[in-house]
Image: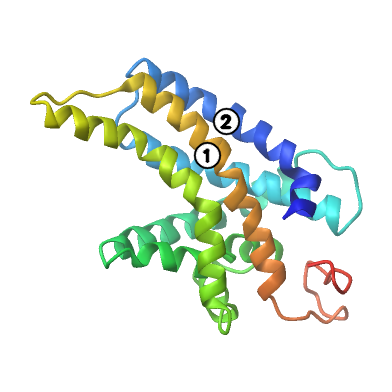
Amino acid sequence: MRRVFARVGWLALGLEFVFALPLFVLTYFELSPGWLGFLWTIVVGSYVECVTLGAWLKRDFQSTRSGPDWSLANERFFQAVGVNFVANLVTTLGMFLCGAGLVLAGLIAAAIPITLFEKRGVIESLRQSWVRSEGRRVALCLTYFVAELPVILISSVPAVLAGLSAGTGRLETFPRVAAITTLLSSLANVAPRLFQVILWLDTRPPLDRSTSAPVSPPPAGTA
């Protein structure tokens, strides 16, 4: 994880901050409808994710000092949105099954790198992530949950405060708190986004350099 963060960590934090600012402002001044946060996470978040992981690919595998990789983001944006939408739908539905969504999240987390780096479709990327996790699913779920935990805790603060206010007999919203937690959760989301690269490197099968695969395997022992 340290190596991945060293390659693109500060770039990822900067992009998350810049792209989260409009939502922060809208939430702060109570101009944001309830559904906008989810849509923003799926659409804008997917674009930021593509840019960040594309930059990592160039810096790590191709040994270039590349900045943001807008080309990969533009090429695979809709596939990334599709993967994130389906993944969020699956994990949200899984949350109603005794928290199973938290488990599922770790098993399909490698789907974004798969669709970006291997040029696979939405369903195939999710399927490949699930299949490749076989034999190490407990470890992957636990480690991904740890990476995701700060996002969960930060995002839950406005709901907790609203619940406490309801206990006093009046229900209040906390737009300023919600705006701040929106910004902080976007920054905290850098860890699970970058951890997806670790999952991809750890679970993908060896690739034949003679094939047309878009990415050649890293040197032994670097995953």
Q: Are marks 1 and 2 in contact (CB under 8 Å)?
A: yes
Q: Residue at x 72, y 80 (%)?
A: 205
- Residue at image point 85% right, 50% down: 59
Residue drawn at 89 percent across, 43 percent down: 65
Return the residue at label 1. 44
Q: Secondary structure at mark 2?
A: helix
Q: Position of residue 21 (x, y in %)?
A: 53, 24
Q: CA distance from mark 1 to mark 2?
A: 7 Å
Q: Amino acid at mark 1?
A: Val
Q: How is the image coloured?
A: rainbow
Which quarter of the rendering shows the N terminus? bottom right
Q: Position of residue 104 (x, y in %)?
A: 43, 68
Residue 142, percent from left and from top? 52, 66
Specify the farthest residue to the left: 169
Neighbour tally class for label 1: few under 14, some 14-19, many 20 plus, Cα within 10 Å: some
**Disc 1 on helix, strand or loop?**
helix
Residue type at tag 2:
Phe
Up-down relation of residue 24 to residue 200 (above or below): above
Residue 19 is tagged as 2
**Disc number at residue 179?**
none
Is any atom of residue 125 visible in this view? no
Question: Of residues 27 and 147, which is closer to you in this image?
Answer: 147
**Outermost top residue:** 29
Considering only order in the chain, which callout, 2 or 1, is on the residue closer to the N terminus? 2
User: Is residue 172 shown above or below 79?
Assistant: above
Q: Which x, y percent locates residue 84?
A: 48, 55
